[in-house]
Image: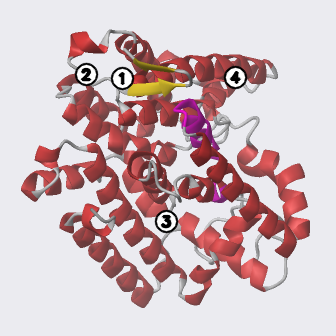
Amino acid sequence: MGVARRVPLAATAVAAGLVLIAVACWFNGRGLGVDSSVYRAGALTLLHGDSLYAPLTTGEWWAPSLPFTYPPIAGLLFLPLTMVPSQLGWGVLAALSALALGFVLHESLPQRARTGWRFGALLLATLALEPVWRTLGLGQVNLLLVAMVMADVLLLRGRKGSGVLIGIAAAVKLTPLIFIAHLALTRRWADAARAMATFVVLNLAAAVVLPLDTLWFWTKALIDGNDATTNSWIGNQSLNGIFQRLTGEDRGALFLYATTAVIAVGLAAVVVRRLYRQGDDLGALLVTAVTGLLVSPVSWTHHWVWVVPLVGYLIAKSNVTGLLAIGIVFTGWQFRMVPSGAKSELSWNAADVLLGNSYLLAALVAAPIVILLAGVDPALRGRSVRAEVVPGESRGVG
């Protein structure tokens, strides 16, 4: 089945609705899409011959003055956005994100829920999830990157171009680099090599076109962007974020973050390998994705759009408790209940800590359950077991 046939009609309808909103805002002169306007401003800056990483002077009057924090290749890839007004640029990204949302949900659901009114209802329900509506509202690319990774890992295995989509995703936003490790963990060595080669080639191409910006990004902007080492804002739902908040941005926060990140990566590698050997490809991918969110220095709430395939995964497992937990945690209501901004996170009380770190804490609570389930003999759970061929030996893996 082609990719186009994996995007249900309901997602196309949502995409069309978003385009109509974009056109209406353009006619009325209303601002739309804070992050998509930054993408467009960065691309316009390149056309003007200025640096991506100096204060942008090409942004919209209604948008906050935000820095461009992506690699130089991303600025080049965003050049098409300069061909349309900012609001229509948002409309393009939002429509593509809606189609990506439909694809991601479709591929994670069991067959019985992939068509008809069930799928339409589930798609509309995912729009209530804070990472989803914030991604769409900001004009972010998160859903597009998730779709690229899922297509590469779940659909393109064994094909000549497998790994390329992950390489492109990592070139646009560095966090998908963790999925190259995922390919290696699941013994897709050629795919991992293609992904890394794609990432390197794209960045080298950018270095040829934008040598000064490339030097600036890799030596300075990479760390300074989004205040990566000391970001304690509530929007940063990563291990680094919670330790920055708990320690008052003390220097010890980085040590705690680095230590727990190493432990998280080590445990995740074991679980991913185990789930993969049990034939649970989507489960293994979700573990890698959540680990990436935890260990990234900055994981904004809208980066947690991996909750969408998690919904499909839980539906396939008939896990009602997990679905209820997602409905409670990932609709974003709790973030309005606690003080945020202007470093107010550094003086939270106990209730604020629980509510304000809810995405991260939900992942940490679920982690031991996933580890225990991954250690259970798949035969006892009726799970399929992937047969692997080890050099010089043929065996079934349990």
Instruction: Judge whether residue 192 is colored magenta.
Output: no
Q: Which residues are magenta?
A: 171-187
The answer to whether any part of residue 246 appears in the image is no
Report helix, strand or loop for mark 4.
helix
Badge 3 crowding class, 10 Å Cα cut-off, few under 14, some 14 to 19, many 20 or more, is many
For residue 257, which numbered disc appears in the image?
4
Report helix, strand or loop for mark 2.
loop
Q: Earlier in the sequence, mark 1 or mark 3?
A: 3
Closer to the camera in the image, 279 or 292: 279
Q: CA distance from mark 3 to mark 4?
A: 30 Å
Q: CA distance from mark 1 to mark 3?
A: 37 Å
Rendered view: 233 above or below 148: above
Rendered view: 241 above or below 112: above
Q: Earlier in the sequence, mark 3 or mark 2?
A: 3
Closer to the camera in the image, 224 or 25: 224
Q: CA distance from mark 1 to mark 4?
A: 31 Å
Q: Amino acid at mark 2?
A: Arg
Badge 2 crowding class, 10 Å Cα cut-off, few under 14, some 14 to 19, many 20 or more, is few
Q: Earlier in the sequence, mark 1 or mark 4?
A: 4
Residue position marked by numbered label 3 in the rendering = 139
The answer to whether any part of residue 233 appears in the image is yes
Q: Amino acid at mark 1?
A: Gln
Residue position marked by numbered label 2 in the rendering = 383
Q: CA distance from mark 4 to mark 2?
A: 35 Å
The N terminus, quarter of image: bottom left
Residue position marked by numbered label 1 in the rendering = 278
State left or right for residue 41 relative to residue 32.
right
For residue 31, which numbered disc appears in the image?
none
